[in-house]
Image: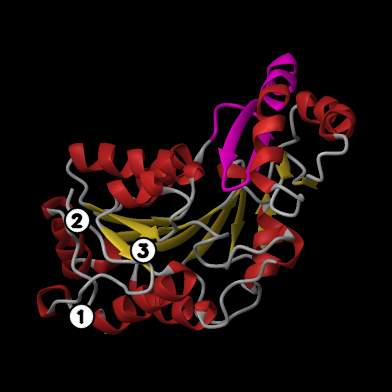
Amino acid sequence: MGSHESDANDSATDSATGGLPTPVTEAGRQGVRALLAAPGRAVIGLDFDGTLAPIVSDPALARAHPDALAALVALAPEVASIAVITGRPAEVAVRYGGFAGVPGLDHLVVLGAYGAERWDAATGEVTAPEPPPGVAAVREELPGVVGRTGAWIEDKGRALAVHTRRAPDPQAAFDTLREPLFALAARHGLMVEPGRLVLELRPPGMDKGVALTEHVRETGAGSVLYAGDDLGDLPAYAAVEALRGEGVPGVLVCSGSDEVPRLRERADVVVGGPPGVVRLLTSLAAALR
């Protein structure tokens, strides 16, 4: 796969890719060329936390990078679709991203709860089925399992996330809770998605890879770029790789983090967190004009 630069610096740029960071793989370079050649058939998939928004100790305080909205407004009219794919409820991601009522974002959708919910900028409406009963059961039992570990429970409606970043010893709390949370989820037909000092309990069957693949097929996209930062983004990476095998060129972008080396190792391009993602989106919009 080749080595990557530090998070402090985005990958090198190249005139052959319109001033965009140059992917370290040939598959990534093919993806960039396809995107630049036919942007109207391109899907841009983006995680929210850690990709469009900096990671913070309290998830309720997360907000999109100050320049993210301008970058999305510049890029959205040039491509088939921008899909923000997140484990958060769609309405929350829309609010924290500041996406509602913004001119120029008609081509943006938010696929919340790993695709179970959808918000369309063109209509301003959220569509979502009822959450499965296992979520309510876990919601009732979870405080007793978390106990005095110092972890914090985030209720996402269709999922519950246990964050240890604010615990006195975040990694120790994470390690302590891992086994009992997996057992709790199994008892109620849920699954656990580990992340960066977070364990999320949610219904099986939907992940960012499923959501991205369905959206690419729905739009009839001829190319796809996906940017993420955490373990929950690995299914989306796998989806892009599968789509490449079907003849849909793709680009994998890591919103760089030393906490999740598995993404860095598989990425075609590594950028320096949300500021790097914003620069990438801004450069892409400029290259397409």
Residue 196 is left or right of residue 278, and the answer is right
Classify residue 49 by image quadrant.
bottom right
On-image quarter of the C terminus? bottom left
Mark toward the start of the polypeptide (1 vs 3) = 1
Residue picked out by circle 2: 28
Residue 240 is left or right of residue 260, and the answer is left
| Cβ–Cβ under 8 Å for marks 1 and 3 | no
Query: Within 10 angstroms of label 2, few (less than 14), some, or many (20 or more) residues?
Result: many
- Rendered image: mark on residue 80: 3
Q: Residue at x 15, y 54 (%)?
A: 25
Q: Residue at x 18, y 78 (%)?
A: 18
- Residue in the foreground of this view, choosing between 215 and 175: 175
| Cβ–Cβ under 8 Å for marks 1 and 2 | no
What type is the residue that disc 2 sits on?
A: Gly
Residue picked out by circle 1: 19
Res 76 visible: no
- What is the x, y in percent for residue 278? 43, 76
Query: Measured along the vertical axis of the image, is residue 143 above or below residue 280?
Result: above
What type is the residue that disc 3 sits on?
A: Ala
Query: Within 10 angstroms of label 1, few (less than 14), some, or many (20 or more) residues?
Result: some
Res 97 visible: yes
User: For the magenta stretch, what is the residue range?
Assistant: 181-206
The residue mark sitting in front, 3 or 2, is 2
Q: Residue at x 15, y 64 (%)?
A: 33
Residue 191 magenta-drawn?
A: yes
- Residue in the foreground of this view, choosing between 247 and 192: 192
The residue mark sitting in front, 1 or 3, is 1
Mark toward the start of the polypeptide (3 vs 2) = 2
Measure the alpha-carbon separation of dots 1 and 2: 15 Å
Secondary structure of residue under mark 3 = loop
Q: Residue at x 37, y 80 (%)?
A: 282
